């Protein structure tokens, strides 16, 4: 299928392609060699993402101290 670049450097995706991604309005754009790769992205509110992270931390049994230690470890000066 062809997609034409407009004068404003935009691409219009063909209907046949778009219908395969219902509810998706955003795509991550990457370059792999000489190809443009679009990957569907679902945007969620930051509060929903934070809630999911907290739920996962709880499921893993991590404590506040574990997270604090991990942050300190990641911020340490490397030699």
Image: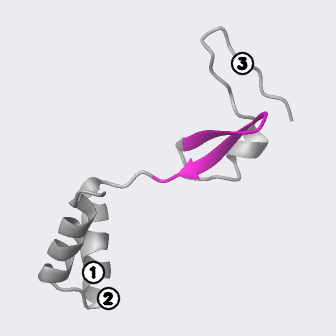
Query: What residue is disc 1 on?
Result: 57
The image quadrant that residue 57 belongs to is: bottom left
Q: Position of residue 34 (x, y in %)?
A: 79, 33
Q: Gap in Å between the C-alphas at discs 1 and 3? A: 44 Å
For the point 56% across and 43% down, the residue is 28
Q: Is residue 55 above or below residue 27?
A: below
Colour scheme used in the picture?
one colour
Crowd tier of the residue under label 1, counting other residues whose Cα lies within 10 Å: few below 14, some 14–19, many 20 or above: some
Q: Gap in Å between the C-alphas at discs 2 and 1? A: 5 Å
Quadrant (top left, top right, bottom left, bottom right) of the C terminus = bottom left
Dominant secondary structure (helix, strand or loop) of the stretch shown in magenta: strand
The image quadrant that residue 6 belongs to is: top right
For the point 28% across and 63% down, the residue is 48
Magenta span covers which residues? 27-42
11 vs 76, left or right, is right
Mark 3 and mark 2 lie on one chain; the one further toward the N terminus is 3
Mark 1 and mark 3 lie on one chain; the one further toward the N terminus is 3
The secondary element bearing badge 1 is classed as helix
The secondary element bearing badge 3 is classed as loop
Q: Position of residue 26 (x, y in %)?
A: 52, 42
The secondary element bearing badge 2 is classed as helix
Residues at marks 2 and 1 touching, judged by CB atoms closer than 8 Å:
yes
Query: What residue is disc 2 on?
Result: 60
Q: Is residue 43 above or below residue 34?
A: below
Query: What residue is disc 3 on?
Result: 5
Between circles 1 and 3, the one closer to the viewer is: 1
Between circles 3 and 2, the one closer to the viewer is: 2
* Nearest the eye: 34 or 38: 34
Q: Is residue 29 above or below residue 58?
A: above
């Amino acid at each position: 299928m062809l997609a034409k670049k407009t004068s404003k450097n935009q691409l219009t995706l063909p209907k046949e392609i778009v219908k395969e991604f219902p509810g998706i309005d955003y795509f991550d754009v990457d370059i792999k060699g000489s190809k443009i790769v679009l990957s569907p992205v679902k945007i969620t509110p930051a509060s929903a993402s934070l809630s999911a992270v907290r739920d996962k931390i709880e499921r893993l049994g991590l404590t506040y101290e574990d997270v604090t230690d991990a942050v300190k470890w990641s911020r340490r000066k490397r030699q």
